[in-house]
């Protein structure tokens, strides 16, 4: 099982105290001293020939309050995202070791085989199944079913010469023609046992060997 966790570490020198940074949620409206220092600095450095008026100071104070609210809102959103990510990871971990179906024509070759299914919308004049690697190289091809409906296909992980292919991610493409010669669009589903769960940018992904796919692509849990 693979779980990626980002960590933040801090280091302090022996004999010294670590200064805790002031919270971003401390608002200008609540901190009178900070505002007065800012106000005094502005007064000290303003152009005597063109001093700021009261309305301008008031507008600045309003702007400070808006920044404060934006900071608080961002903090709350960060907290919500963190909670959602934790819940998503916890629910996804229950899938580890389960055989599932995912909406993908790709799947990781693990333990020497990959299982797919494809659905023909109508009777096909001919159907060809093509297995390719991540570089687009064709490693196996053969004839498929022609009757309409869903058909299962298990690739044994060997190329056209019968040589075992290395573990990795492989893709099934199905080329099919209707009886009138027109090309069909054939959806493909892949099957595999979840080997791990990863969190990336707040999204949980399922791992099947080297292949990863978001949990949103999950179609069914089979056992």
Image (cartoon, rainbow, N blue to C red):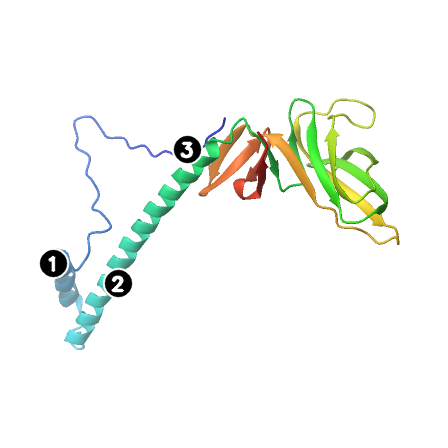
Contact flag, marks 3 and 2 (Cβ < 8 Å)? no
Q: Nearer the viewer, residue 110 or 74?
A: 110
Q: CA distance from mark 1 to mark 3?
A: 40 Å
State the image coordinates of residue 193 (x, y, percent, origin top left). 59, 28
Look at the picture and state if 100 lies above or below 48. Answer: above
Q: Nearer the viewer, residue 139 or 173?
A: 173
SS state under label 2: helix
SS state under label 1: helix
Q: Residue at x 32, y 53 (%)?
A: 74
Q: Residue at x 57, y 43 (%)?
A: 217
Q: Which circle, 1 or 3, is nearer the viewer? A: 3
Q: Residue furthest bottom?
A: 49
Please name the residue that numbered disc 3 is placed on: 5
- Location of the C terminus (image quadrant): top right
Q: CA distance from mark 2 to mark 1?
A: 16 Å
Please name the residue that numbered disc 2 is placed on: 66
- 170 horizontally vs 12: left or right: right
Please name the residue that numbered disc 1 is placed on: 32
State the image coordinates of residue 167 (x, y, percent, origin top left). 66, 26
State the image coordinates of residue 159 (x, y, percent, origin top left). 78, 27
């Amino acid at each position: 099982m693979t779980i990626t966790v980002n960590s933040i570490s801090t280091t302090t020198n022996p004999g010294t105290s670590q200064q805790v940074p002031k919270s971003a949620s401390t608002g200008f409206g609540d901190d009178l001293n900070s505002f007065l220092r800012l106000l005094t600095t502005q007064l000290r450095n303003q152009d005597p020939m063109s001093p700021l008026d009261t309305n301008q100071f008031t507008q600045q104070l309003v702007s400070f309050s808006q920044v404060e609210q934006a900071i608080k809102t961002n903090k709350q959103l960060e907290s919500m995202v963190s909670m959602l990510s934790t819940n998503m990871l916890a629910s996804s971990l229950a899938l580890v070791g389960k055989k599932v179906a995912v909406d993908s024509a790709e799947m990781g070759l693990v333990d020497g085989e990959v299982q797919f299914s494809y659905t023909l919308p109508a009777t096909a004049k001919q159907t060809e199944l093509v297995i390719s690697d991540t570089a687009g190289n064709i490693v196996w091809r053969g004839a498929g079913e022609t009757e309409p409906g869903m058909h299962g296909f298990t690739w044994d992980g060997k190329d056209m010469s019968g040589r075992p292919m290395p573990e990795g991610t492989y893709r099934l493409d199905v080329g099919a023609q209707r009886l009138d010669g027109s090309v069909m669009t054939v959806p493909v589903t892949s099957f595999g046992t979840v080997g791990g769960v990863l969190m990336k940018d707040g999204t949980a992904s399922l791992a099947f060997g080297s292949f990863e796919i978001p949990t949103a692509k999950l179609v069914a849990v089979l056992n």
